[in-house]
Image (tube, helix red, strand yellow):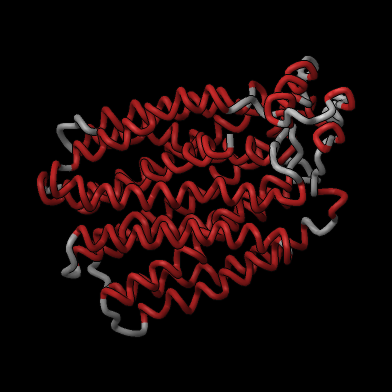
Amino acid sequence: MLIACFLIIALDGADVQSASFIYPEFVRLWGVEKPFISAIVVGGLIAMVIGASIAGPLADRYGRRSVIGWGVALVSTGTFLGAFAWDARIFLIIRAFTCLGLGAIMPITVALISEFAPTQKRARVVTTVFAGYTAGAAISGYLAAVLIPMLGWRWYLVAIGGLSAVMLPVFLKVVPESIGWLATQRDGERRVREIVQRVLPGADIATLKGTGGERTEAKVGGIKLITSKRYLPIMVGIAICYFIGLAVIYLFQTYFPLVITQSGLQLSQAGILVAAFSVGGVLGALLIGSAMDTFGRFKVLAVAWLIAIPAIWAVAFSTLDYQTLIVLSFIWGILLQGVNSGLNALAATLFPADARATGVSFMHALGRFGAILSGLVGGVAISLGWSIGKIFFILGCPLIVGVAAIIFLSVVSGRKDDVVIEDPAFLKA
């Protein structure tokens, strides 16, 4: 089950990253203007916001597994269709359709896997699965470096879409519905017992209570609950953190290949740099998740961002060769992607099962506006011909605000009895 969820997140990361490698081809083959590239980027991000906003409440009402399945189906179909686009305008429409699914997959998968993870290891489990996103982006970079020069960008998209199509039936077969969500349903006790017997064959099922905790929150509804006086400050705090994290990461992932190729490097070299960033992100997710469980959630995330600031500004204040850029890309991946994974693990602990999918998906939806802003800023920076140094200086600045946002979130969520939702008793059996 963990492997299947890891692979689903990996395919999500591969598809998100894939578009950035075909934009230089659009410029070369179709003469697409840079502002229109920015329009494709922003349009896709807006579609992700819509997808996440819709998917969360649906997953809290109808279950996590089916919503993820529909998301993967949308992504696979859209990626295939994108390979047959005959101009950039058609690709923009298809990409927006694809991004509806991309916006749904990640937050709902995080909610699902967190509800199977032991409380004391939850951050480690969630970040390990979420590391699939950066692993997928690394695979996407490798495939781009191999397939685009050899076969063209269309076959590259066919390969990415084909992987998603193959993975969908596997996911539906091996991943059960969330027992945390089933526990909140009036008729969920029988299905919970069946799933626990399947996942933990040695468990003493006779001791399971099947109550699923309080049902008063389920009657309120996910959206009303996360906007209540109790949870709204937490929602605001985690959304600000994710907004900043995604703004920095997306500016790097989306425009870095284009900036590097315009600076004289080959597209294949840009692919290696993005792959190093992604591989570092896999390691960062594992390290930061483990550190969060050991040293504290907020402390680890804040320290990682503090270290990332001078690492990013190194490019702004010095001229670096290609080999040094590879090393720095790896370090940026550890810190930036690692914190991004950690924020997902953190969000899964801040909301009750009745609204967990809504809380995590709204964090993603609101955070995507950071990615939208980065798309606009990146487009302006490239249009104005800004240097790599100036762009990387801008990349580091938001992290200062991000550290302050983490401190704010630690304050508003400081009362553990109010905000850290423990597993129902029967999940600990």
Establish if 108 lies above or below 255.
above
Taking the spot 41% from the left edge, 71% from the top edge, the residue there is 394
Q: Position of residue 315 (x, y in %)?
A: 36, 78
- Residue 84 versus residue 277: which sits nearer the camera? 277
Left/right of residue 269 with respect to residue 2 in the rendered view = left
Left/right of residue 259 with respect to residue 64 in the rendered view = left
Question: On the image, which quarter does residue 410 sit in?
Answer: bottom right
Q: Where is residue 416 in the image (x, y as percent from the top left)?
A: 84, 54
Taking the spot 37% from the left edge, 54% from the top edge, the residue there is 375
Q: Where is residue 234 in the image (x, y as percent from the top left)?
A: 72, 51
Q: Position of residue 37 (x, y in %)?
A: 25, 48
Establish if 295 lies above or below 13.
below
Taking the spot 73% from the left edge, 42% from the top edge, the residue there is 351
Quadrant location of the C terminus?
top right
Left/right of residue 197 with respect to residue 176 in the rendered view = right
Return the residue found at the far bottom. 318
Establish if 44 lies above or below 35.
above
Quadrant location of the N terminus?
top right
Taking the spot 88% from the left edge, 50% from the top edge, the residue there is 417
